[in-house]
Amino acid sequence: MRVIIAIVLSAAALAACTPENVSHAEVTGSIDNCARKLYSQYNPKDKKQCVAVCIACERGVVTTCSTACTLRGAI
């Protein structure tokens, strides 16, 4: 019986969690505004532009931004 209660409580605790990698900047659209300031015709599929925006607006580094842009479909 204790095991079932522990499982239910664990499931409830996990369900209440929110992902920490979602920043408020993504929710408010400030990254989009930042990208528009850098490139008037910002194309997230252009890897060079994507990496530059990632570094400037999301405070990333070349390695992680390059990987993230590739995973998002930038060429």
Image (tube, rainbow, N blue to C red):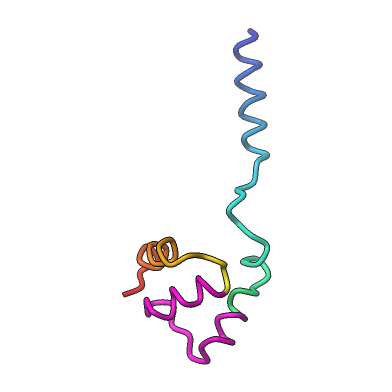
Residue farthest toward the top in the current orientation of the protein = 1
- Please state the total of marks drawn on the protein image: 0
Tell me which residue sits at (51%, 71%) in the image: 55
Q: Is residue 2 above or below residue 10?
A: above
- x and y, in percent, of residue 21 in the image: 58, 53
Query: Is residue 55 inside the magenta stretch?
Result: yes
Q: In this rendered view, identify the residue nearer to me: 42 or 53.
A: 53
Q: Which quarter of the figure is the C terminus placed in? A: bottom left
Is residue 55 shown above or below 39?
above
Q: Residue at x 56, y 68 (%)?
A: 58
Q: Is residue 54 magenta?
A: yes
**Front-lying residue, 58 or 45:** 58
Dominant secondary structure, magenta = helix
The magenta stretch is 33-56
In the image, what residue occupies the spot 44% across and 75% down? Answer: 50
Residue shown at 38% from the left, 77% from the top:
45
Instruction: Tell me residue 66's x, y (percent).
Output: 39, 67
**Residue 12: quadrant of the picture:** top right
Q: Position of residue 59 (x, y in %)?
A: 56, 67
Identify the image quadrant of the N terminus: top right
Find residue 64 and report its horizontal and vertical position in percent. Answer: 43, 61
Q: Nearer the viewer, residue 4 or 37?
A: 37
Left or right: 29, with 64 as reference point: right
Extreme bottom residue here? Answer: 40
The answer to whether residue 28 is left or right of residue 62 is right
Taking 68 as reference, is 56 above or below it?
below
